[in-house]
Image (cartoon, rainbow, N blue to C red):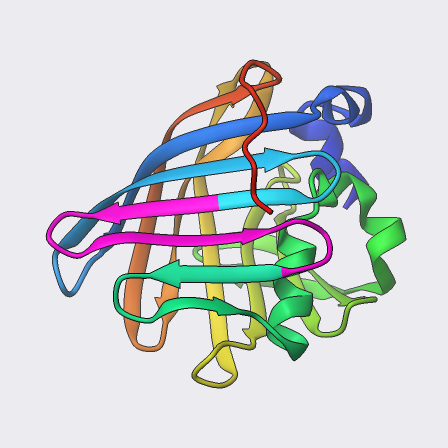
């Protein structure tokens, strides 16, 4: 976990980032749907994710450290509760990767496995908000290859596997620009095209 922070820019560089905005595209592969993606994260715990699908409208999710919510044209607005809320608050924590000692109650390397064609250390950790996640880090380069977890949602608990690839230097930090995975039988693919930090006015996610 510490090596991942080091190879993606270092602890000092991670600590400098107090806000960041990234944009790109999200694709629902089997449905052929593409949407414009924007993510705005503000220290310490505000986050807004907005996806705009042509012909469908916007899907928004946000959190501010106390509440987590979503809003879409299909489901309308709703507050997240229980495990779903806990997971959203964790994901909304700015710079969570570098704060893993504060956020995890345990972390253990379970062994070496081949994941997505790459030899990886598989690390199991339990978050203090609840839930267990397995992260897979490349043996040769320390970069995150995949994350495996169970996620609570409005439709029940789901097994989610996310793969990370095509790492590029963005504003002096190394970031995965392609994320892909399966959720409820649907293949989702996210491609980031830009990432900026501490250059924009913080978004209001309350």
Residue 121 in view in this figure: no
94 up-or-down from 124: above or below = above
| Residue 171 colored in magenta in the image | no
Residue 165 higher or lower than 106, as above or below: above
Q: Residue at x 31, y 58 (%)?
A: 188
Q: Nearer the viewer, residue 144 or 99?
A: 99
Q: Residue at x 71, y 73 (%)?
A: 132
Residue 88 rendering spot, x and y as whole percentages: 61, 61
Q: Is residue 187 left or right of residue 12?
A: left
Describe residue 131's horizontal placement relative to residue 155 as left or right: right
Judge from the rendering whether residue 11 lies leftward or rightward of residue 58; answer left or right. Answer: right
In the depicted structure, whether residue 119 falls above or below residue 99: below
Along the line of sight, which residue is nearer the eye, 121 or 189?
189
Between 179 and 20, the residue placed more toward the observer is 20
Whole-percent x, y for residue 144 in the image: 59, 46
Residue 36 appears in the picture as rendered? yes
- Judge whether 26 appears above or below 154 on screen: above
Residue at image location 73% in from the left, 26% down from the top: 14
- The main secondary structure of the magenta stretch is strand
- What is the x, y in percent for residue 176? 48, 36
Question: Could you say which is closer to the camera, residue 35 or residue 3?
Answer: 35
Within the image, what quadrant is residue 11 found in? top right
Q: Which residues are magenta?
A: 49-67
In the rendering, at what x and y percent does residue 173 appear?
60, 21
Q: Residue at x 39, y 45 (%)?
A: 50
């Amino acid at each position: 976990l510490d090596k991942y922070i080091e190879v993606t820019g270092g602890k000092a560089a991670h600590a400098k980032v107090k806000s960041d905005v990234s944009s790109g595209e999200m694709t629902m592969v089997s449905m052929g749907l593409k949407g414009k993606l924007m993510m705005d994260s503000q220290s310490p715990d505000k986050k807004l994710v907005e996806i705009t699908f042509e012909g469908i409208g916007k899907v928004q999710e946000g959190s501010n450290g106390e509440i987590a919510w979503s809003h879409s044209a299909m489901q309308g607005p709703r507050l997240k509760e229980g495990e779903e809320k806990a997971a959203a608050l964790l994901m909304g924590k700015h710079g969570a990767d570098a704060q893993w000692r504060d956020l995890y109650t345990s972390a253990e390397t379970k062994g070496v496995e081949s994941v997505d064609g790459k030899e990886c250390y598989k690390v199991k950790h339990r978050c203090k908000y609840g839930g267990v996640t397995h992260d897979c880090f490349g043996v040769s380069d320390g970069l995150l290859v995949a994350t495996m977890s169970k996620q609570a949602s409005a439709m029940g608990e789901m097994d989610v596997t996310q793969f990370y690839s095509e790492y590029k230097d963005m504003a002096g930090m190394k970031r995965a620009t392609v994320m892909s995975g399966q959720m409820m039988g649907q293949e989702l693919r996210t491609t980031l095209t830009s990432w900026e930090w501490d250059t924009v006015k913080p978004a209001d996610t309350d």
